[in-house]
Structures are given as structure tokens and as C-alpha cells.
Image (tube, grey):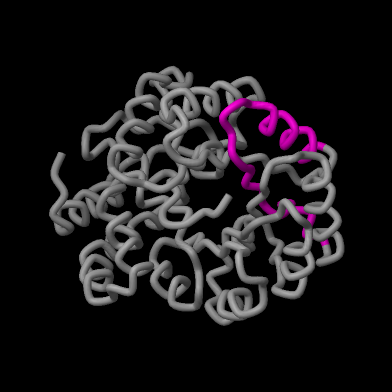
Amino acid sequence: MQLRGVGTALVTPFTSDGSIHLEALRRHVAWQIQSGVDFLVPCGTTGETPTLSDDEQRQIIETVVEINAGRVPVIAGATSNATSDAVRKAKAVAAIEGVDGILTASPYYNKPTQEGQYQHFKAIAEAVDKPLVLYSVQGRTGANIEPATLLRLSEIKNIIGVKEASGNMAQIAEVCATVPLGFTVLSGDDSITLGVIGHGGAGVISVVSNIIPREFSELVGAALEGDLPRARRLQRRFLPLMNAMFFESNPIPVKAALAVLKHFEAHYRLPMVAMSEANRTRLANVIRSCGLTS
């Protein structure tokens, strides 16, 4: 499996009582596919996975698979800071028919050494027969996957790529120059996707594509095709929206934006809370400035 283009890190819609809003999820997934995204990523951090039970995660993934009906790859999240639990979760996700691969992040809070991370990901890879995409996001986990470690991990047959969200362009450039041809490097930050593609990246696992799936797919597609003037025009137009996704912690702003655009109401599970009124006003202004309407 070769991932390329835009993969949406899907939000999880909730109802006002905190239960999963399955009908809203179905509509959202259908819209993403119809809008041209290249793959779907349910049950990542953007989906508020730390607040979901195992049964709820299965229900979400099965719903995404059902609506997708084999049209694009589904890469489902399975992460834990205990390797044994990460293996258990990965096995459960791998057993769901219609899941094409697994996204798994560095163990959080523990801050393992590079050798510890290598052994952690190796154990997951050996436990499942699905392709794995690793997720390097030091800002959330406290642990960075260094290029030398990633090179070692790329030698494991079913570790096929990395979502690089270190924010360190020098590191990302080294990763792209170091890993074997065919190993997929995906941006984990929307705003620097053009730069990652310039270094040899294959696309992005995106938050903002929840809001602008067609437009962001056009941007990334143009960059991958070498049409940089078009890609830059779209980047200039939507960069304020990408930056607005950090007005507060993800996924607070992206869900608030979807509510402003009347896709579904923005409900969260603690410790995520509703966006402040001041930031919601700022976000609404950005949405208008980008030419988006409800």
C-alpha cells in the first residue's frame, strides 16, 4: 500500500449528552470521500481517542469502513504508552475488516529512549499483519523519533511510513533524505506540508481537511504534481485557517469551525472543552476571510 495525498484525521462528532453522533460521522465521512481526500484516519488524537472506550473505537472504525465501502484506504489509530496495550489495540484494529493500515504514535509521558521506541514499534509490527504508519509528535508525547531510529524501523517489512509532526524542518529533511525509496513520509502539520513535499514527502495527515477537504486536496495535489504556483496560491488563501487550528488545543478549533459552518454542533469530552467566545469570534473571522460560508 502506497499512501499519497491527503488523509483526513477524522474528528469524532458527539451529541450533547456525550455519546457518539454516528449519523453526523456518516455524513462527515461521505463528504470527505466525495470531496476527494485520498485516505481516512479515524481514531487518532483529532478523534479524541483518549476519551473513547475500546467498544466505541471499534464502532467508529466500523462505521468509517461501512461508509467508505472500499473507496479509499482506511488507516486507523492504535496507540498506548504501554507496549503490551499498544499491541492489544493494534491487534483489535487489525481484525476489523476493511482496515488497511494502522497509525501508531510514540509512547506518551514515559519518554522512552530511542532504543525503547525501536523495541516498542517493532513489537507492534511483529504482532499484526497490517502496514504501520508511525507517528512522531514530540509536542504531545514528549518523545521524538530520531532519523537514525526511523531508518532502523524502516527495515521492518510492514512499517511503511511516518507521520512527521516534529515541526523541525531540518529533521524532516534528514528523514526524507535518509529513509529508503518507497518509505512514505507524511506531514503531520498542515501549514508546512508544501515544505515536506518539497523535501520528498508524499502528502499529509491533515486536521484542516476536516473543514476544506476539496480545497486542501487541490493544494496538496498541485504540489505533488509540481504545480507550485497553484499550490502557493491555495496556501496563501488557507494558511490563516491552518494556523487557526492552533488557537486552542486540537481538536477544539476544528470542531468549532465545523459548527460555524453548520456541519454539526461542537461537543467534546473532558478534558476538552468548548472554545472560548473570544477565540470562536477570531475563528469565525478567519473562516469568512478565507471565503468559506455555511
Q: Position of residue 103 (x, y in %)?
A: 62, 47
Of the 4 image quadrants, the one containing the C terminus is: top left
Q: Residue at x 22, y 33 (%)?
A: 262
Judge left or right: residue 120 versus residue 75: right
Q: Return the residue nearer the eye: 257 or 159.
A: 159
Would you say residue 106 sits in the magenta stretch?
yes
Q: Is residue 243 rendered to the left or right of residue 154?
A: left
Tell me where residue 225 sits by quadrant. bottom left
Q: Is residue 132 above or below residue 198?
A: above
Instruction: Report x, y in % for residue 110.
Output: 79, 54
State the residue at coordinates (50%, 38%). Answer: 47
Residue 29 sits in quarter: top left
The spot of residue 83 in percent (x, y) is: 82, 44
- In the rendered image, the vertical position of residue 171 relative to residue 144, given as above or below: below
- Residue 98's x, y, as percent? 56, 29
Identify the image quadrant of residue 271: top right
Task: Looking at the picture, tell me which residue is in the foreground, 258 or 215.
Answer: 215
Q: Is residue 239 above or below residue 59?
A: below
Q: Residue at x 27, y 69 (%)?
A: 231
In the rendered structure, does residue 252 fall within the stretch colored magenta?
no
Residue 124 vertical placement versus 154 (above, below): above
Q: Is residue 233 left or right of residue 2?
A: left
In the picture provided, is 186 more to the left or to the right than 264? right
Front-most of 1 and 271?
1
Q: Residue at position x 86%, y 64% from top?
A: 115
Span of residues in magenta: 85-112
Foreground residue, 80 or 159?
Answer: 159
How many marks on residues?
0
